[in-house]
Amino acid sequence: MSSQDSSSSSPGPHLPTIKTHHSPPRHPSSVSSAISTAGTPRKVGVAVDLSDESSYAVQWSVDNYIRPGDAVILLHVSPTSVLFGADWGPLPHLSSDDPNSHDGLQKSQEDFDSFTASKISDLARPLKDAQIPHKIHIVKDHDMRERLCLEVERLGLSVVIMGSRGFGAAKRGSDGKLGSVSDYCVHHCVCPVVVVRYPDEKEGGEPVVSVKPTTLEEDEEEWPEAKPTIDDAANHKC
């Protein structure tokens, strides 16, 4: 698992390091005011995959939700293997001389990790342009839905924002029903979830925003000013 601070003072593009964490998963401004009292420090998570819908959710967060003093985390769950990438939406075409060989698979995995880091850095561009300090938090797991909820709890987020169509294919839950990642998070995350649906012509070109509140007390732990660090949690056990 890796975390990286980013700010406008960075000398140039600096992609986050991806480190595998093998522990198993456990388990508009009016929106902002409905979730948190004005002036209360917040930890705002924006859960993203590699899609345009996630990009839109980041931009929406900058324009409508994030306020000065918020601690912002861009959260991404990457597949444990490039072979499982189909569940995470469209992936880049990766090839090697012998994709079934150990070296070929390793090369494909390295290419995919590099692509992921580059794409997440691109998704963070609205935060950089707005000079909003933030962290990029990337973990690897075979189950995106459960791991997202786990990381939301572990990071102590006050709220998580995500795009409704931005998490690849629908996944079958334990009850046998198909549902999106956002639907799962709405029902299982310990904090409020803000779901931003990408606008289309049927909705007049306006985004549709849904809020799942929570009765749990908001984490009021103070977050110090972000400093450039990379945390290695590869040996951490949940």
Image (cartoon, rainbow, N blue to C red):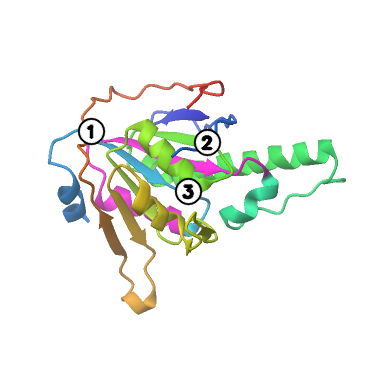
Q: Residue at x 55, y 61 (%)?
A: 169
Residue 65 included in the magenta stretch of the image? yes
Q: Residue at x 47, y 48 (%)?
A: 145
Residue type, numbered disc 1: Gly
Q: Looking at the image, which residue is at 39% across and 64% down? A: 198
- In the picture of the structure, the residue carrying the numbered disc 3 is 145
Q: Quadrant of residue 104?
A: top right
Query: Viewer-nearest of labels 3 and 1?
Result: 3
The residue lying toward the viewer, choosing from 119 and 183, is: 183
Disc 1 element: loop
Q: Secondary structure at mark 3?
A: helix
**Front: mark 2 or 1:** 2
Magenta run includes residue 30:
no
x then y, percent, for residue 177: 48, 63
The residue under label 2 is 139
On the image, the x and y values in percent for residue 11 come to 47, 28
Q: How many marks?
A: 3
Magenta segment? 53-81
Q: Three-letter amino acid code at disc 2?
A: Val
Q: In the image, is residue 180 above or below residue 50?
A: below
In this rendered view, identify the residue nearer to me: 230 or 189: 189
Q: Which mark is residue 69?
A: 1
Image-based side of 105 in relation to 78, left or right: right
